[in-house]
């Protein structure tokens, strides 16, 4: 089967860094091979650098970003624990669902889709309900809006702060320790520029001491996985060695370029794309001042067939963008400039072919 070349500019996987692809194709190592364990240790250290944390327990969970979400909740909340969740899009809603399945009493604090999470409302709810956990999505993939996690960390009190940074890690600043984040998770397929399959996760000592001793999930029990590095490493399950090698390759690409330079590249691509879309007469969806550079949401013009335009982009030009979700499924496009895809040449091409299709 021939796989066609695509420029992946949707909200899902981006085009991976060549270093990640090359690493995936290397001869397979055993999961107990000393050379693999060295790669794993270097990968965990690289994740600490990107998360901006000194947490010893920083590791790639074997599963996509959704596995990271479940691991974060299943290890921190159980029957009767209060979880206050800021909801401003689909992934905040998923947090509520996962927390409820863990037995938590979920207090949902809603903000309009496209707006950042309301910090004061979330903190007020956490104080009134004596929350064990405050949970928030840093970069909401469904809307392209960024929320102020640092402000939540400053006012969290005794609660644990749990952050989803699936669409932000590696593309925009994430500062776990400085923001007071106790547990955070991400995914590999977005700004990290690696195929999907792993969920980077970090948990600090404060959250570790208050973790659930026997969580509902055996596979995602962080206590059984252990430190994941050095002498404290435990054998729990067979590590996805090829995926870890791919993540190691993607992190190497980021550090070779420099994390600050990578973030600047994402920022420039987002600014150029958003300015060009507005110059075409299109309306951006996320609130001004809270827009992500790596994921742009734009309203589909009246009378335009959203799915038809996306199909034309894919079939004529090999360019993939995403539709909206929920009530915005046919009225919003989601355009990603993440990882290796975040290049001005890709932005220029997308703007040109979208203008042609729309007749603008």
Image (cartoon, rainbow, N blue to C red):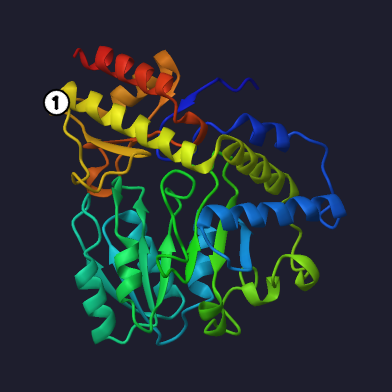
Instruction: Answer above or below: position of 190 versus 7.
Output: below
| For residue 224, side relative to residue 253 (left or right) | right
**Circle 1 residue:** 303
Judged from the image, the secondary structure of the residue bearing numbered disc 1 is loop
Split into 4 quadrants, where in the image is the N terminus? Answer: top right
Can you give x and y, in whole percent of width and height, for residue 257 in the image? 56, 35
Split into 4 quadrants, where in the image is the C terminus? Answer: top left
User: From where the camera sits, is residue 122 visible?
Assistant: yes
Residue 280 image-quadrant placement = top left
Mark 1 closeness class: few <14, some 14–19, many ≥20 residues within 10 Å: few
Residue shown at the point (46%, 52%) measured from the top left: 166
How many dots with numbers?
1
Can you give x and y, in whole percent of width and height, for residue 93 in the image? 33, 62
Can you give x and y, in whole percent of width and height, for residue 326 in the image? 27, 49
Residue shown at the point (42%, 22%) measured from the top left: 346
In terms of depth relative to the viewer, which is nearer, 8 or 216? Answer: 8
Residue shown at the point (18%, 44%) measured from the top left: 288
| For residue 26, side relative to residue 200 (left or right) | right
Can you give x and y, in whole percent of width and height, for residue 13 in the image? 49, 38
Residue shown at the point (21%, 64%) measured from the top left: 118
Residue 347 image-quadrant placement = top left
User: From where the camera sits, is residue 93 visible?
Assistant: no
């Amino acid at each position: 089967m021939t796989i066609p070349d695509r420029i992946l500019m949707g909200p899902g996987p981006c085009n991976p860094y060549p270093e990640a692809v090359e690493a995936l194709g290397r001869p397979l190592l055993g999961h107990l091979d000393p050379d693999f364990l060295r790669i794993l240790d270097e990968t965990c250290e690289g994740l600490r650098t990107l998360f901006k944390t000194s947490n010893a327990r920083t590791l790639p969970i074997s599963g996509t970003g959704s596995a990271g979400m479940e691991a974060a909740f299943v290890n921190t909340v159980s029957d009767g624990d209060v979880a206050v969740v800021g909801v401003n899009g689909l992934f905040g809603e998923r947090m509520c669902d996962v927390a409820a399945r863990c037995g938590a009493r979920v207090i949902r604090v809603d903000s309009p889709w496209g707006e950042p999470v309301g910090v004061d409302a979330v903190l007020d709810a956490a104080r009134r309900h004596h929350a064990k956990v405050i949970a928030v999505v840093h970069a909401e993939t469904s809307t392209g809006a960024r929320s102020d996690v640092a402000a939540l960390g400053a006012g969290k009190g005794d609660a644990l702060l749990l952050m989803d940074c699936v669409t932000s890690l590696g593309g925009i600043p994430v500062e776990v320790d400085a923001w007071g984040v106790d547990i955070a998770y991400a995914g590999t397929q977005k700004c990290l520029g690696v195929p999907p399959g792993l969920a980077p996760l970090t948990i600090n000592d404060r959250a570790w001491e208050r973790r659930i001793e026997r969580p509902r999930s055996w596979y995602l029990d962080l206590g059984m996985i252990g430190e994941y590095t050095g002498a404290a490493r435990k054998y729990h399950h067979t590590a996805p060695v090829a995926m870890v090698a791919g993540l190691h390759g993607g992190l190497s690409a980021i550090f070779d370029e420099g994390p600050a330079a990578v973030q600047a590249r994402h920022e420039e691509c987002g600014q150029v794309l958003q300015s060009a879309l507005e110059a075409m007469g299109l309306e951006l969806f996320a609130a001004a001042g809270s827009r992500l550079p790596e994921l742009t949401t734009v309203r589909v013009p009246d009378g335009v067939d959203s799915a038809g335009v996306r199909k034309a982009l894919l079939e004529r030009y090999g360019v993939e963008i995403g539709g909206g979700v929920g009530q915005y499924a046919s009225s919003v496009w989601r355009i990603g400039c993440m990882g290796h895809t975040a290049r001005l040449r890709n932005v220029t091409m997308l703007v040109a072919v979208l203008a042609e299709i729309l007749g603008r």
